[in-house]
């Protein structure tokens, strides 16, 4: 039971920022990762389609005996987590990337919080709805920042192009006076420093990867599921393989990684 892997999925390789944070604090856990590169980006898709994809991927991860399924994609967490819970709650532990961040923010006394993410995540209103319940009285300003994903994937991280795009989005007057900014996309931890710098380090930039990894550890401890057997073997699958994905996967995972193609779409 304890040796069973942590199933993690994302639309592509962005969720590897979460996988990396998990390996940092839980090096003894086995990971099975699935990136749905055949269908990315999820940020432009409808909720219905993301629910369909997420259900099938969860079946795949459960077919590999996952003791937990972690939705390491904000767009899928915003659109499909409720349907996944309805379908799979009895069969595994389900964790998303939004609830742990909302729980964390509920312990802080921010009056004005910004959230940036894909069009799907922002239009779902999930962060606002959840923060309204858990941190009443907090004003939440959300903004879709769709250029950030291709910008990061193309390697524009700390240069004139990335500085101009980040500045153009974050200088929007609606974000004036925020005390915290949620990075509502699993790609964004890659540019966390640049975003903090834009705000002269005076805004708390909330990166879900570490918070979610801590939530996972708590859940494994509570359920007596920590892998203490010393046997570790990670597996990384994507639904469409190109050397390009392999290259950017290394940037997100911050280390060597072997991606294998898993053809779950038949
Ligand atoms: N990783 C996805 C997320 O967190 C963004 C990429 C996409 O649009 O598929 O929303």
Image (cartoon, rainbow, N blue to C red):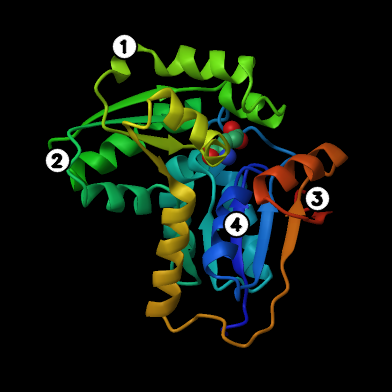
Nearest the eye: 96 or 203: 203
Farthest-out residue, right: 243
Of the two numbered discs 1 and 3 in the rendering, the one whose residue sits closer to the viewer: 1
- The residue identified by callout 3 is 266
Nearest the eye: 137 or 119: 137
State how far apart marks 1 and 4 are (Cα): 34 Å
Q: Position of residue 210 (x, y in %)?
A: 46, 54
Of the two numbered discs 2 and 4 in the rendering, the one whose residue sits closer to the viewer: 4
Is residue 42 among the parts visible in the rendering? no
Whether ligand 1 has any atom under 8 Å from the Cβ at mark 2 is answered as: no
- The residue identified by callout 1 is 173
Quarter holding ligand 1: top right
- The residue identified by callout 4 is 19
Say which residue appears at 17% left-offset and 43% top-offset: 109
Disc with the residue nearer the chain's start (3 vs 2): 2
Disc with the residue nearer the chain's start (2 vs 4): 4
Say which residue appears at 55% left-offset and 62% top-offset: 22
- The residue identified by callout 2 is 136
Disc with the residue nearer the chain's start (4 vs 3): 4
Instruction: Judge the density around disc 3: few (<14), some (14-19), many (≥20) Cα neighbours within 10 Å.
Output: few
Q: Residue 207, labelled with which disc?
A: none
In the rendered view, tell whether residue 232 sits above or below residue 265: below
Whether ligand 1 has any atom under 8 Å from the Cβ at mark 1 is answered as: no
Q: Is residue 183 left or right of residue 36?
A: left
Quadrant in which residue 237 is drawn: bottom right
Instruction: Judge the density around disc 2: few (<14), some (14-19), many (≥20) Cα neighbours within 10 Å.
Output: few
């Amino acid at each position: 039971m304890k040796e069973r892997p942590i199933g993690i999925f994302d639309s592509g390789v962005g969720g590897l920022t979460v996988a990396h944070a998990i390996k940092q604090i839980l090096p003894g856990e086995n990971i099975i990762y699935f990136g749905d590169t055949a269908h990315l980006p999820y940020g432009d898709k409808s909720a219905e389609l993301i629910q369909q994809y997420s259900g099938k991927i969860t079946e795949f991860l459960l077919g590999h005996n996952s003791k937990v399924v972690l939705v390491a994609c904000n767009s899928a967490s915003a659109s499909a987590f409720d349907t996944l819970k309805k379908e799979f709650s009895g069969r595994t532990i389900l964790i998303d990337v939004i609830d742990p961040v909302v729980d964390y923010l509920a312990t802080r006394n921010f009056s004005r919080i910004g959230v940036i993410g894909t069009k799907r995540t922002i239009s779902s209103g999930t962060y606002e709805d959840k923060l309204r319940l858990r941190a009443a009285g907090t004003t939440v300003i959300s903004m879709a920042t769709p250029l950030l994903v291709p910008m990061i994937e193309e390697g524009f991280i700390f240069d004139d192009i990335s500085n101009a795009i980040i500045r153009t989005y974050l200088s929007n007057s609606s974000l004036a006076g925020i005390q915290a900014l949620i990075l509502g996309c699993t790609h964004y931890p890659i540019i966390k420093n640049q975003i903090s710098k834009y705000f002269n380090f005076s805004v708390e930039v909330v990166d879900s990867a570490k918070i979610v990894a801590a939530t996972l550890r708590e859940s494994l401890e509570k359920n007596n599921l920590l892998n203490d057997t010393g046997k570790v073997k990670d597996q990384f699958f994507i639904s469409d393989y190109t050397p390009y994905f392999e290259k950017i996967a290394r940037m997100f995972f911050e280390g060597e990684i072997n991606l294998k193609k898993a053809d779950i779409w038949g």
